[in-house]
Image (cartoon, rainbow, N blue to C red):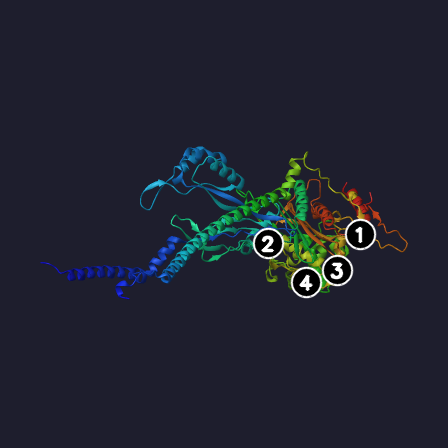
Amino acid sequence: MSSNRRRNANLLPVARILLVGTLLLTVGGGALFYVNAKNEVHRNGQRKKELERELLALETKDEVITSRIAKLSSFDSLRRRQVQERDVFAKLVPVTDNLVVRLQDKVPTAGESQVRTVSNLQPAR
Amino acid sequence: MAVSSRKRAVCLGACVAFGFTVFSLRLVDLQVARADFYKVLAVEKHSTQQTIYARRGAVTDVKGVPLASNEPVKTVVIDASVIRHPDAMAEVLSRHLELPLAQVRDRLARQKTGVDGKTGPSPYIVIKKEVPEQVAEALREEVAKRNLRGLVFEQDSVRVYPNGSMLCHVVGFVSRMQGGLKGVEGVERSMDDYLKGHDGVRFTERDRTGKEMPAFRHLERPARDGATVKLTVDMVLQDIVESEMDAAIKQFRPKMATCILVRPATGEILAMVNRPHYNLNQREGVADEARKNRAIMDMIEPGSTFKVVTTAAALDAKLVRPDTSIFCEHGHYSYGGTVLHDSHHGYGDLTVNDVIVKSSNIGVAKMGVMLGDQRLYEYIRRFGFGERTGVQLPGEIGGIIHPPHRWSKISITHIPMGHEVGATPMQVVSALCTVANRGKLMTPQIISSITSASGETIATYPPVEVRQVVPPEVAEALVNALKEVVSKKGTAALAHVPGFSVAGKTGTAQKTSPNGGYEHGRYVVSFAGFLPAEKPELCALVLMDDPVPGNTPNYGGYIAAPVFSKIAQRAVRYLNLTPNPDLIKVSGALAQNEEGRRR
């Protein structure tokens, strides 16, 4: 067959196109992934910052409450309330010696009841 | 003249090459030659160093009751450069922060000249400091609701003392100085290194708008919060002592008063009270006298409580025994050209025991003469007088004990009864603790332990024995004599505690005059005692300077001893010490006798 009659066809270099395509996709995909990862890092950073802020707010709240509890339950405050709010505050009766009951540790003898004896020892009056 | 295309191409190529060469040279200049300079500039522009502030540690009592802690507060700042409605903002700030409206308006109108010479609204105007959190929160909500811009809150904290004036001289306070809070007095000062903590640091980058980019944080060293300092003081006992001392002060109106409660076996200070005192949260205008921790900073002549030292020395030197008889000259003893008197009665022969029980000046002076200058001085020093006790509080003084070569002819008769001696109340109680502790001198302790912010124990303070001052047998003999002091034949019958054997010694020292000599009718009265005498759990000193006795005799046994008794009765109940039933009956009878005698 003469050369003029040879079929004039442009063959597509499929393999090369595939190779280039794959390379472009890989590079492009990689770049997109990189950008996405970078954004994710920023987002996480912002989230971290928000959490830090929340944690600080909670710690602050905790400190405020702890401080208020300490103030309200302090001896100084209770003593003041006892004087100022005499009518509403629990009336505190001083425990004098005649109001104290002392338990005596007594070794029970055989046959004796196991119930411990109680004596209210007071100064002779 | 036509130029060939080749020449034109060469010319163009040369221009491009020259251009690139210039750019390349500039690039080399920027990246290599001046790299360091620009690197620093870039770091300055984008990188910042943030300080992470450490929280100051707390101070607590032995049971963990907070005595000093931090309270978060806010500093309200305005960026006037972004404010749109200054009048509305001024009104809101004025209402919430309780500031005059005109003052807030003035501040908001403050101008600032920039580096470029332009004048504009100031971007940083401090409106108010130390604003409580709840006020700041309410302000934030209203500002957000009304959509006002330019309000910034800065986090800060203040030191608070929940118990106000209680234990003020021990806890102390802080002051804001360059570099943060610094302890000025008390434990806040002596333990400042542990309490202050260490600030942390963070290097981070900012974007072009100045916002931090947390993803690009480099080096970070977290802050190390201050440690918690736990004291040996028990606030329940402190409350008991304070309330009883206040009641006594109301009755006798002394110039000053001190009470120290110690556990003799360990030297732990369980309570410490000084009057006058002040509120740690309101320190403005407080007199220096009120800020003084007299228990360790004040020097007094201990008076008769000091007789314990002389007697212990004479017993240890084997010059006398408890039953040795000493002639007390019927109350008038001439020595060195002066006459020494006994303050109560004139006595004839008294045993060494009775010299203590009756508190005879002449008896103890004779023991001093028997000992001699040098030996007496050595024993005084062995009991810890003339040097700091070593308690972990700032400003402690050592007192004054002159060496024998500086003594006068009559010093040997005056020093044994507690005159010509400058001692702190802490030294006096420490000396009595030595007797209670069967001759062992312990270092007084006010710090129990130090715990880091993470809960790890950094330091503990075990009891420290300084020395065995006198042998246990000598101390035991002295305890027997001191027990009799708190009996109907002694000077401190009113110090009795029902159910417990109490040992102690009264002191009534005439006040020294600033012009020399002594002031007539003005005394420092005291009582130092411990209980149970057999195995002491508590040792206390009650001291009042220049009380107004009214109908009560101006003696330690009548003014200070009853206070000791009241404190000890409540303290033993709190500490759950078991009373001796036989002694309850004895004490009852003793109380009746004493009441009858006073009537």
Q: Could you tell me which chain the residue with mark 4 belongs to?
A: B
- In the rendered structure, which disc, 4 or 3, sits on the residue that comes first in sequence? 4
* Residue B66: x %, y % from top left: 61, 48
Q: Are marks 1 and 2 in contact (CB under 8 Å)?
A: no
Q: Is residue B26 left or right of residue A70?
A: left
Q: Which mark is residue B580?
A: 1
Could you tell me the amino acid type at mark 2? Val
In the picture as drawn, the residue positioned furthest to the left comes out as: B1
Compute the Cα span from label 1 to label 2. Answer: 37 Å
SS at mark 2 in the image = strand
Q: Nearer the viewer, residue B273 or B122?
A: B122
Image depth: mark 1 or mark 2 in front:
2
SS at mark 4 in the image = loop
Image depth: mark 3 or mark 2 in front:
2
Q: Nearer the viewer, residue B508 or B210?
A: B210
* Residue A113: x %, y % from top left: 88, 51
Badge 2 and badge 4 in a common chain: yes
Q: Are marks 2 and 4 in contact (CB under 8 Å)?
A: no
Q: Could you tell me which chain the residue with mark 2 belongs to?
A: B
- In the rendered structure, which disc, 1 or 2, sits on the residue that comes first in sequence? 2
In the picture as drawn, the residue positioned furthest to the front comes out as: A1
Task: Mark yes or no: residue B188 visible.
Answer: yes
